[in-house]
């Protein structure tokens, strides 16, 4: 019992450090941006109305939608949009057309994560650094250089892994939440009646008296739920109970106290504090330490998002929407600790571009919102299909369960469309570019498979004919990797043509990816003897499993297969793709796929193959 309590406490602190970094730092800029729009007149009633809007946005979107409802939609314990997508797509497997469009919508939602992944670190670190301006307006010129320096250091250390510094995330974020709660209480005690703003009638009255203004400022109010998706995405790391406990006992109370403290400050000091109410909450002597703590919290929030980008990319690759990219494991104990150089520096380059283009958290706030509200809307739609077709609940109950959230999401999404020309296009452009790459890769692979299938040789028939007059057999085991089960791999044909030998043992291995998070070792392999010491092997992975082909094939030990690392060779076939005018895709997309295919050279590293893996060039294939 004691161990269980200790484990729950540890997971709760861990969730505070990883899950709530983004939403925990939203206090840096949310209230400031609401009043910075210039649409809200600074009055007593408007301050109460804005605070009530923030409180009920947190309550409805985070507490009710994500914590209460969406966390129930786990895919074998895993969460996130990819997990939700696989749950929903399996639930409508008997409706292929609906499933096709659902996959496209879900994958586009995943692409929006990258747009959000560029804006969030930029706005969070900039928001922290802008505290220097409160100390002295002359410090303004150092904000952007220091922001870029902090971001570069953050991305530079990724290759070393986060296992070492990760243990400090929880305690630092606990200190952050305690600090922002204390700052809120410091100002609430001088204006305790501000707590009445929890009443929904203040939000209702504000909306009824100012319907147009309310609609416009929803694009700024949504900043208070920055990172809300992380509650669901990180469920597999911490579990539902620790996330719920951390939210209701620590994160939400601290956020509410700070927001209401900012409201009390505004009522006490007026327009003087509007420029940056969060940092004006601190005594003058505490401003610099608060900037330091806010920067640490911003770095932690950004770190969680970067790690999430690696994880999402790996899952999308295993679902077949991206080519295999280099994945480096940074921990021998935790397989979830990975580093993807291409993703890392690609994100950094886009974040530097965002900081250089927008130059302030206020301008970035104009770009923020469209991506995250679209993601939230997609999550709500997918949740409907899960509760209706996977959980088999009555239609009326499903509509009631998701209809309120859909209405709220539509309101926030529509409001954020007003930001489109002011910067909202930026994350959408990133998401659109990534989506184009993903669907091009998927469609190109389908066309390539179709083209190769037309000239492919059946493996069983080929081996039967080969064994009538077999070539010279040499010692050792050959592992032939092929993307199509039961087809003769080009690497085997090249080996027979040029070396005129056949290994003593031959494994024809196909990797199958499945729309489930995990597949255990007991279901990892499917084998079939083809005679002549040749075997057909299918290796099964879930989208959260780590590829380690030698470890998986080691399960064949004792079945008559010699897998001595010193005498086992791995052969990968690579097809040379040349685009042509065809029925499948436009010419420019075929050329794009051909370029992506030629650039995807990390297959051996992705599959964790040893250095003796051999890549054989295949025949030219036109798509």
Image (tube, helix red, strand yellow):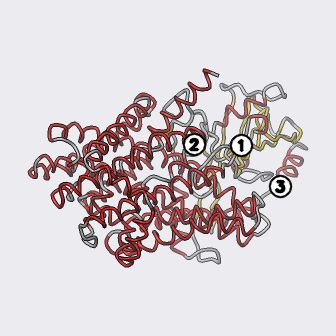
182 left or right of 342?
left
* Residue named by callout 3: 458
Considering only vertical position in the picture, is 40 above or below 63? below
Q: Is residue 455 visible?
A: no
Mark toward the start of the polypeptide (2 vs 1)? 1
Q: CA distance from mark 1 to mark 3?
A: 15 Å
If the image is split into quadrants, where does the N terminus sit? top right
Which mark lies nearer to you, 2 or 1?
Answer: 2
Query: Which residue carries the number 1 mark?
Result: 480
Q: Which residue is mark 2?
A: 606
Mark 1, secondary structure of its residue: strand
Quarter of the image where the C terminus is located:
bottom right
Considering only vertical position in the picture, is 396 above or below 250?
below
Please name the residue shown 25% across and 38% down the image.
292
Mark closer to the chain start, 1 or 3:
3
Foreground residue, 27 or 122? 27
Q: Of discs 2 and 3, which sits in the foreground?
A: 2
Residue 22 seen anywhere in this rendered image of the structure: yes
Q: Residue 443, located in which quarter of the rendered image?
A: bottom right
Above-or-below relation of 59 to 385:
above
Residue at 62 percent of width and 54 percent of height: 69
Q: Residue furthest front?
A: 193
- Secondary structure state at the residue bearing disc 3: loop
């Amino acid at each position: 019992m004691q161990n269980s309590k200790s484990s729950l406490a540890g997971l709760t602190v861990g969730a505070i450090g990883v899950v709530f970094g983004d939403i925990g730092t939203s206090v840096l800029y949310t209230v400031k941006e609401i009043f910075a729009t210039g649409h809200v007149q600074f009055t007593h009633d408007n301050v109460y109305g804005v605070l009530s809007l923030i409180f009920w946005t947190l309550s409805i979107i985070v507490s009710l939608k994500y914590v209460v409802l969406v966390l129930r939609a786990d895919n074998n314990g895993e969460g996130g949009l990819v997990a939700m997508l696989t749950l929903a797509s399996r639930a409508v497997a008997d409706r292929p057309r609906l499933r096709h469009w659902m996959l496209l919508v879900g994958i586009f939602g995943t692409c929006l994560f990258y747009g959000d992944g560029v804006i969030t670190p930029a706005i969070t670190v900039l928001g922290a650094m802008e505290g220097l301006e409160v100390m002295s307006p002359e410090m303004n010129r150092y904000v952007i250089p220091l922001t870029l320096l902090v971001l570069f250091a953050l991305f530079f250390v990724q290759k070393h892994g986060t296992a070492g510094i990760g243990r400090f995330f929880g305690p630092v974020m606990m200190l952050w939440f305690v600090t922002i709660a204390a700052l809120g209480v410091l100002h609430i005690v001088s204006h305790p009646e501000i707590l009445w703003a929890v009443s929904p009638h203040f939000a209702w009255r504000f909306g009824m008296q100012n319907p147009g203004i309310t609609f416009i400022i929803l694009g700024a109010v949504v900043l208070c739920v920055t990172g809300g998706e992380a509650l669901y995405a990180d469920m597999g790391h911490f579990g539902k109970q620790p996330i719920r406990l951390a939210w209701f006992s620590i994160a939400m109370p601290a956020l509410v106290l700070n927001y209401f403290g900012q409201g009390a400050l505004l009522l006490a000091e007026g327009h003087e504090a509007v420029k940056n109410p969060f940092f004006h909450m601190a005594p003058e002597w505490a401003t610099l330490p608060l900037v330091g703590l806010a920067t640490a919290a911003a770095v932690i929030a950004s770190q969680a998002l970067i790690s999430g980008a690696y994880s999402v990319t790996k899952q999308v690759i295993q679902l077949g929407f991206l080519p295999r990219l280099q994945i480096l494991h940074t921990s021998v104990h935790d397989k979830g600790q990975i580093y993807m150089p291409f993703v890392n520096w690609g994100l950094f380059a886009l974040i530097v571009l965002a900081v250089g283009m927008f130059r302030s958290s206020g301008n970035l706030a104009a770009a923020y919102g469209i991506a995250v509200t679209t993601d939230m809307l997609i999550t709500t739609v997918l949740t409907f299909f899960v509760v209706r077709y996977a959980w088999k609940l009555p239609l009326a109950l499903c509509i009631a369960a998701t209809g309120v959230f859909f209405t709220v999401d539509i309101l926030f999404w529509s409001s954020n469309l007003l930001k489109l020309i002011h910067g909202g296009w930026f994350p959408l452009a990133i998401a659109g570019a990534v989506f184009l790459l993903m669907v091009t890769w998927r469609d190109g692979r389908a066309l390539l498979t179709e083209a190769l299938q037309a000239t492919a040789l059946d493996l069983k028939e080929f081996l039967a004919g080969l064994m009538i007059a077999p070539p010279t057999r040499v010692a050792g085991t050959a592992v032939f990797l092929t993307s199509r089960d039961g087809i003769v791999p080009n690497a085997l044909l090249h080996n027979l043509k040029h070396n005129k030998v056949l290994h003593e043992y031959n494994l024809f291995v196909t990797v199958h990816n499945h729309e489930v998070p995990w597949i255990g070792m007991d279901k990892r392999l499917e084998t079939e003897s083809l005679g002549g010491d040749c075997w057909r092997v299918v290796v099964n992975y879930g989208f959260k499993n780590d590829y380690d082909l030698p470890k998986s094939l080691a399960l064949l030990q004792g079945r008559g297969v010699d897998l001595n690392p010193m005498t086992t060779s791995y052969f990968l076939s690579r097809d040379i793709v040349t685009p042509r005018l065809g029925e499948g895709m436009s010419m420019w997309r075929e050329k794009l796929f051909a370029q992506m295919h030629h650039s995807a050279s990390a297959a051996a590293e992705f599959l964790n193959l040893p250095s003796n893996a051999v890549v054989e060039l295949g025949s030219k294939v036109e798509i």
